[in-house]
Image: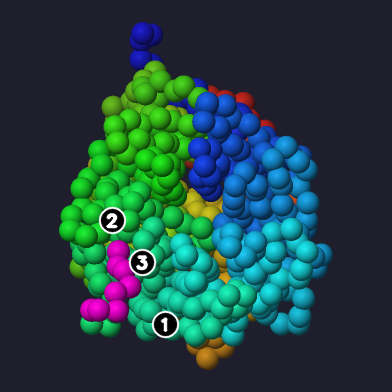
Amino acid sequence: MAETQVAPYGSWQSPITSDLIVAGTIGLGGVRLDGNQVYWSEQRPTEGGRNVIVCRSADGQIRDITPTPFNVRTRVHEYGGGSYLVHQGTVYFSNFADQRLYRQDPEAEPIAITPEGAYRYADGVVDGNRNRMICVREDHTGSGEAANTIVSLTLDGSTKPLVLVSGNDFYSSPRLSPDGTQLAWITWNHPNMPWDDTELWVGQLHADGTIAASQKIAGGMNESVVQPVWSPDGRLYFVSDRTNWWNLYRWNPAVEDGVEALCPMAAEFGSPHWVFGIADYAFAAADDLICTYSQEGVSYLASLNVQTKELSPITTNYTSIAGIHVQAGRAVFNAGSATEPGAIVQLDLTTGEVTVLRRSSTLEIDPGYLSVPRPIAFPTENGLTAYGFFYPPQNRDYTAPTDERPPLLVKSHGGPTAATSTAFNLRIQYWTSRGVAVLDVNYGGSTGYGREYRERLKGQWGIVDVDDCVNGAKYLVATGEVDSDRLMIDGGSAGGYTTLCALTFRDVFKAGASYYGVSDLEALATDTHKFEARYLDSLIGSYPAQRHLYLERSPIHATDRLACPVIFFQGDEDKVVPPNQAEMMVNALRAKQLPVAYVLYAGEQHGFRKAENIKRTLDGEFYFYSKVFGFEMADSVEPVAIENL
């Protein structure tokens, strides 16, 4: 091994380059099982972010199913999910360009089965007895808000979709009982989000498939019910946070209020439904449920006997687990750990043997360049505790001068009702391997710590999240682990708002980066899509009745308090946070003669999917900080135009 070099933090040469990350990394998700075949979706940056369905046959052969130029992605709720399903070898999927549903038979080209028009579809399930699909439809053909319903449509597209359930603002998770006689679904109304107040309904089906009598099973005020699943013997299971934690329940008319708890514990067996098709549990048999749950940001796998209610841990090396599907004695899911990239993993439920079917990254990186996150809990406002994961700088080839402390990049996750985890993240390792420490914060409002922790952000967005990011940085300064003069913060979407608030309303951070972040809450409240149109009611207050809060907490109205450099990254087709949100802030910084950079990407929406843009963003943010703080970059990267520096 070569001798370790002494060099300042931020100047270390790293093998984890942006080219390596975008060339060797794909997004994995959407696992489906059909017979002895496993399907999943791959988001490929090198193909412009195209989503492709892939199939692994019983003999281990992997092949693409989706032909070019189809892109399997739905825009229902804008965030999508639940974009395809497989039934007896035939794939049904939503195509991003036209949002129509397509049928693709084995070895055949896709054929559209829904009419042209401003319709979107998601979260489908096949009703084999009636030769149809049941799914969520979002209708944009009328004026005003889109209309969300549950519809059915024939599998060959021979008839127009038929509305089965309507009248509420939102629907998700239509799930058919094994005998085809009952349909379960989740519904909610403005101003709620699916992690606030939702209801679980069950409808009896006529022979022709229309809904007969229906009844509410669970949910309502202060209860989030998600993920209804029918067991093989026809019993309905679901996840509810009625006792603060998202725990497992089943519908049982024989008990009080018809709801039976299965495994009460201080853990999350569910997750916020930003997207359709989330699957945190599935049945191996009528009495055997395979599930994942999280505690303090770490995922675990287990088997639950639903008769004895005994939970048995299943030992794995993974700390991030999601998307569980079970069939024929095997569980297939997405998994990763702090030092292993995400993968599609198959678990033999009899032998316990684990097989990796597909890795999100083909890169083989020496562990000497990888920073292992350390969970931290730190004091924050009002005597409370907040959480995060700290990544110290790590590069086997370098050490820093003994009198130097590393710069710190604080990461504020999006949502804000979401969470960060210990899942392997090359974009974090990009920083730590160059000598920059990272703190990934699960501020108050994050999921994974119970409803009470999640509701710390009620009416307090722009305050609690900012306090927790600031106090996390202060905590690491106080423990002597980072340099107080080189504190940075970045975040995307809602995390971009937290970032801009921290830079504007606090004086702890010296620079930052906003990825499609919110700067004007009032503009967001009056110019966003249906799913989040009333989200701010709970995070800020009702609009326009409490307009003063929207103005007080908008960084754009307090630029006189902003006194540090900021770089902005934005997609020009973003419908969630439109470009004008970034541009208003950029213009304000220009007027103040503060260092500012603005990178606008053509053809990108909310989040960047193209390889060249992901690369430019990583390198561009590091380049920006190198100029602000005087790092001597080891890499030669494409410069970003920085004004006023």
Q: Position of residue 529 (x, y in %)?
A: 64, 71
Q: Is residue 444 above or below residue 109?
A: below
Report which quarter residue 616 is drawn in: top right
In the depicted structure, whether residue 98 falls above or below residue 43:
below
Q: Is residue 133 left or right of residue 549?
A: right
Identify the residue at image location x=71%, y=82%.
144
The amino acid on which the numbered mark 2 sits, given as a three-letter code, is: Asp
Instruction: Determine if the magenta segment contains residue 254.
Output: yes
Q: Earlier in the sequence, mark 3 or mark 1?
A: 1
Q: Which residue is mark 1?
A: 216
Q: Which residues are magenta?
A: 248-255
**Do tag 3 and tag 2 residues touch (Cβ < 8 Å)?**
no
Above or below for 15 versus 583: above
Please tell me which residue lies in front, 316 or 419. 316
The residue that mark 2 highlights is 287
Q: Is residue 545 magenta?
A: no
Q: Identify residue type, mark 3.
A: Arg
Contact, mark 3 vs mark 1 (Cβ under 8 Å): no
The front one of 640 and 60 is 60
Instruction: Residue under label 3, please give it.
Output: 235
Relative to 259, 578 lies left or right? right
CA distance separating discs 3 and 2? 10 Å
SS label for mark 3: loop
Q: Nearer the viewer, mark 2 or mark 1?
A: 2
Q: Quadrant of residue 369?
A: top left
Q: Tag 1, which secondary structure?
A: strand
